[in-house]
Structures are given as C-alpha cells and as structure tokens.
Amino acid sequence: MRIKTAHSYNLDMFCFLNVMTADDCYVRGHPEAFSEWYPRLSAGIKTKAVASDQSEM
C-alpha cells in the first residue's frame, strides 16, 4: 500500500486566521490563542472580521 502525504500549510493558515478574527467556534475552543493574537490585529482587519460575521446572520 502506498500512502501519499502532503503539508497542509494553507489549511493551517485558515485555521489560524479563524482564531485571530474571532470565529466563534475557535474563540470558544481556543480562548488563550484568541486573547494572545486578536489584540495584535489591525483595526481594519478587526472591522472586516466583524462585518463578515454579521453578513452570515
């Protein structure tokens, strides 16, 4: 049996961005990561994250 493996850098980056942009699922699951990284985001990114969350409702 041959198994092919690959790196998941793109998926890892998306998961990291979800934590940083206040995605509810990740904020509840990883509060330490959120509290460490969210304050480091620019105001523009925070605004876009909030707008994106509100458009999904």
Image (cartoon, rainbow, N blue to C red):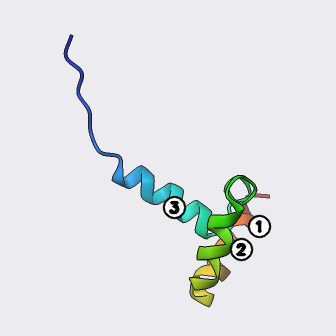
Numbered disc 2: secondary structure: helix
Residue occupying image coordinates x 35% and y 53%: 9
The amino acid type, in three-letter code, at marker 2 is: Val
Measured in 3D between alpha carbons, the distance from the residue under mark 3 to the one under mark 2, in whole angstroms, is 17 Å
Q: For the N terminus, give its image quadrant.
A: top left
**Outermost residue to the front:** 32
Q: Name the residue at the left extreme.
A: 2
Of residue 51 and residue 23, the one placed in the foreground of this image is: 23
Q: Which residue is mark 3?
A: 16
- In the picture, the disc for residue 54 is 1
The residue that label 2 is drawn on is 50
| Rendered image: mark on residue 27 | none
* Amino acid type indicated by mark 1: Gln
Q: Amino acid at mark 3?
A: Phe
Q: Residue at x 74, y 58 (%)?
A: 24
Going from the N terminus, do you reach mark 3 or mark 1 first?
3
